Structures are given as C-alpha cells and as structure tokens.
Image: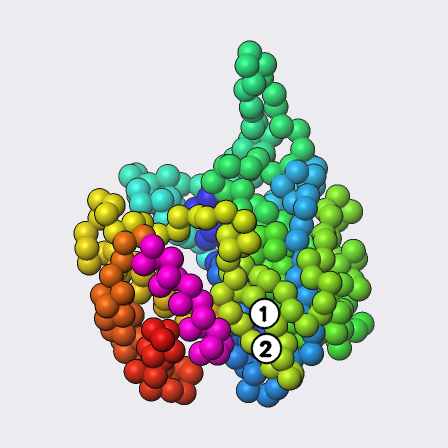
Amino acid sequence: MSSIFSLFQRQIENYHKKAHFYSGIKSYWIVQNRDPVLQAVRKSCERKTAKCISSFDFSTLYTKIPHDKLIDVLNKIIEFCFKGGTRDKISIHSSRVASWVTRGKESSSIYTKESIYLAVEYLIRNCFFKLGNMLFRQDIGIPMGSDPAPAFANLFLYHYESTWLDSIKKSNNILARKFGQVFRYIDDLLTLNDGNSFESHFKDIYPEELQLNKENADSSSTNFLDLHIQIINQIFTTELFDKRDHFGFNITRLPYRDSNIPHRMFYSSIAAETLRICRASSTSSSASSSIQALVTRMEKQGADVMKMKNSIRKMVSRHHIHNKYGIRGNEFINLVFV
C-alpha cells in the first residue's frame, strides 16, 4: 500500500502541475523537501515583492480523523487515479516499486481497484496495540508507524485543499490565485505573500476534526522545515534552522574523529553539512556564521582545522558556492576561517 499510494501521489502531482500551468491556480500544496520553497524565495527576491509569511501546524492530524471519513477520502483518491487510464492494474515488483500494467508477471503482486479498496479498509480498521496483557484496537485516527501513514495523511489533506479550491475558482478566481505559494510538508504548512488569505479561510478548507495552529506571531519571519525565513527590505532571506541549537544541552550530530569511520568519510561529512548550510542560506554572512559554529563544534570532536579547511574549499569549488554569493572562492573560505 505504501508503494501504491506513493505512485498515486506522483500521478496526482503531475496532473496538477499541468492544471496549474493552464489555470494559474495551484491546487497541489504537498512538498517533499525545502527545494520548492527556496525556488519561490529566489523568484520573489528578484522582484523584491516579499510582504508576509506565515507557518501553521496540525496538532491533531494523526489522532482525530474518523475512520469512515478517512476511508471515504482514500477511496475517492483511488477512484480518481484509476479514472481515464488505459491500464487497470498495479504491479508491485520485488523492489517494492509500483507501476501501472495491463497484465502483470507471475513474480509480481497484482492489485486491482477493488483489491486496493479492501486493503485500505483492512489496514485502517485492523491496527492493534498491546499493553501488558491487554489488546487495544484503534478506532480513530491514522495508524501511526505504518508505512503508508504519511501518504494517507498527505492525500487526505490534499483532497480537502483541492476540493475547496475547485469550489471557489469559478466564483472567486482572484482569491484562488492567492494560494499560489502555499507549501505543505505533511502536517507543517507555509504561506508566502498570500495576504493572510489562508489564515482567513483554513477553517473552510479542512474538516472540523483537525486543529490547525499558527506558529509565528510576526508575519515577517518564521521557521519551516530546516529553514528560517525572514523579510528584510521586501526581500525574503533564508538561513539554516536547527531546533537542536535551542535545546539548552549539547547534541552530538556528526561523528567524533576517533570513531570507527574512515578518515576521508569523516571530513566529507563535514563538507556535506557545509553544503547543506550554503544551500539554505541566502547570504554569505549567515552561511559563514553557521559554518563557523560547525567548525568550532567539530574541532572539539577531534577534527583538524586545516583538513576541514581543505575539504570545505574543495566543496565550495565543486558546487560553485562562491558564484551564489557573488564573491571569490578564497574570499568565502576566509570568511569562515577568520
């Protein structure tokens, strides 16, 4: 089921990309990572049109959805994905990859639309938990920990989002277009330059069982995934956000030098973390300050400063980081290693 619903999600995403191109209305908000957000931020920076930003979080996504409502929505998703195609079966290969087929091989597992209906209902209604000598059956909410749970949650919310947008785009096309920069990663949601339209209408979008909370009080800055996004002079700026920095105690994030890993891999992991910082940071100053904190932390974990410097210099050159910030490679390295 996890493979099948991942296939459905890709199919729905491709469908809505084409629909967005022709209609100008974005009905698919699901993202797999921060890249679509960074792309939207870069486009806005070129025009200097940053006005407002908000983030939200579902506090009851997995725990409050009635099973009847969940099964009904997932059945509609299944019906939509099977509609109009020339292939009426899904094959699950030994590699757990799902694909559409007309006839499957004997070595593969074959699912029809009807068998997927039955499998979904069985998975949702037959989730049990054991506590001591007592056995409990879950009768509300998405079974957390099961492989298809993230896809179930994503597509459940998508159904209400796209249905609501379809209902208003004819009567209020201007409002529908304001949701063009809404991004959702499962239960975390971000809006850019929507004029607070999402905040005004989210109760009309989602079922009453779900509780959605706004995360930021100030519409000029917020956190989303591993990004801290801020508006400065009508420009979105980004930098790496790591909630572990605010824990109040030390967290070991990368291995120690004397751990049982190859010497080359140890320094490559530092360079990889540096690349993650650079991709998240819109300015050289924010990138260099985050990398300086990384270098200081890794030096305490046994890393040699000159070897870190050489490893980071190679990464900067290979990925053309200096071009992003409009400075020379050596200048960027000098910012980090003062």
Callout 1 secondary element = strand
Query: Is 266 placed left or right of 280 in the picture?
Result: left
Q: Nearer the viewer, residue 165 or 112?
A: 165
Q: Is residue 233 above or below residue 319?
A: below
The residue positioned 38% from the left and 57% from the top of the image is: 297
Q: Quadrant of the C terminus?
A: bottom left
Q: Nearer the viewer, residue 29 or 227?
A: 227
Magenta stretch, main secondary structure, is: helix
Say if the magenta span includes residue 290: yes
Whether residue 27 appears in this view of the structure is no
Judge whether 193 appears above or below 7 on screen: below
Residue 98, percent from left and from top: 40, 49
Q: Is residue 61 magenta?
A: no
Q: Which residue is mark 1?
A: 229
Lateral position of residue 1 relative to residue 165, left or right: left
Count of all numbered marks drawn on residues in the image: 2
Q: Position of residue 46 (x, y in %)?
A: 55, 87
Locate residue 299 relative to residue 11 in the image: left or right.
left
Please name the amino acid that badge 1 sits on: Ile
Q: Say what amino acid the circle numbered 2 marks.
A: Phe
Q: Quadrant of residue 167?
A: bottom right
Residue 236's disc number: 2
> Label 2: few (<14), some or many (≥20) within 10 Å?
many
Q: Local crowd at mark 1 within 10 Å, few (<14), some, or many (≥20)? A: many
Looking at the image, tell me whether mark 2 or mark 1 is earlier in sequence order: 1
Q: Which residues are magenta?
A: 282-300
Describe the element under mark 2 as helix, strand or loop.
strand
Q: Residue at x 64, y 84 (%)?
A: 233
Q: Where, by quadrant of the figure, is residue 200 drawn?
A: bottom right
